[in-house]
Image (spheres, rainbow, N blue to C red):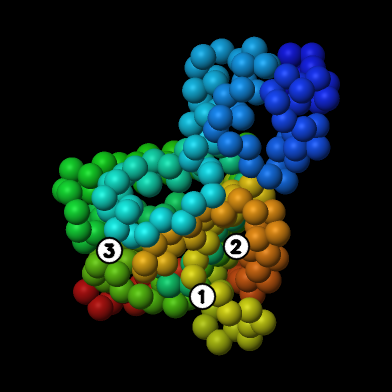
Amino acid sequence: RETAGLAQIPAAEAAGTSQAGLSRFERGRSLPSPELVRTLAGVYGATAAETARLVELAEAIRPEHLNSRVIMQRGLNHFQQRLATIEASSRLVRSFHPAAILGTLQTRAFVTHVFGRAGGDLDDNAKSTATRIGAQSLLDDLDRQWVLIQTEGALDWCYGSAAIMAEQLDHMVEVSRRPNVTLGIIPHRTPATVQPLHGFHIFDERAVHFGTTSGAALIGDQADIEEYVAKFNLLAELAVYGDQARELLTRIADEYRQST
């Protein structure tokens, strides 16, 4: 809008929305529909490619609850690509999971095992693997930040095999050394003031994604997002970081190696 030289009021009038609504969109307090994004792009004189990209993001980030059967019917890769689009548009990603290794941290062997046991079409599973691994290239962009929190219990869960887990934890040690990644581990028996029932991902402060056994959800309500941010901050206070986290990861990786 500023590049187009438009103030909020005339821009809102041209797009058929309110100035207050446009202000909320620009401050990340609410999400515009794909249709409004297309209209605003036209008002601002965006190129066709810019418009297509903005509409794609608006469609990806729209609030939605999806049943697992719906996800499988559409294809796992369809949903993986949607999440990758949201992550690619974010400067700060905060993720927590109490029981599973976060996708951003997963090795190819781990990801292959995840989607290899997902059921459904084999080609779609292979594409899902490629999409998840491909999204990890965003870690090379030092202008982006990740804060990733795992429980020690997630590390102890031997998913796939001891060999897969040993490699996985070694990889997490290396990722933790990246300057734009903060990796925290919540040790066993750490006194806690919060009981998270599922993992979740916060994209900037625009959207939250979480999955359960029966489905997945993307939420954009600001009050809900603020609740997840507050919960994440409490969890982050419980974690150890840096050398302490790496020592814990290395110890568990060595235990896996000894069991093979």
Q: Residues within 10 Å of mark 2 (few under 14, many from 20)?
A: some
Report the residue at 43% width, 72% height from top: 99
Kindly indicate whether the residue at mark 3 contacts the one at mark 2 (C-beta within 8 angstroms): no
Q: Position of residue 30 (x, y in %)?
A: 68, 45
Specify whether 187 is left or right of 156.
right
Q: Residues within 10 Å of mark 3 (few under 14, many from 20)?
A: some
Residue tagged by mark 3? 164
Report the residue at 17% width, 49% height from top: 121
Q: Position of residue 24 (x, y in %)?
A: 75, 40
Q: Quadrant of the C terminus?
A: bottom left
Specify whether 185 is left or right of 44.
left
Which mark identifies residue 242? Answer: 2
Nearer to us of marks 2 and 3 is: 3
**Which of 88/187 is in front?**
88
Identify the mark nearer the N-term, 2 or 3.
3
The quarter of the picture where residue 20 lies is top right
**Secondary element at image label 1:** loop
Q: Residue furthest left?
A: 122
Q: Is residue 170 visible?
A: no
Residue tagged by mark 1? 197
Identify the mark nearer the N-term, 2 or 1.
1
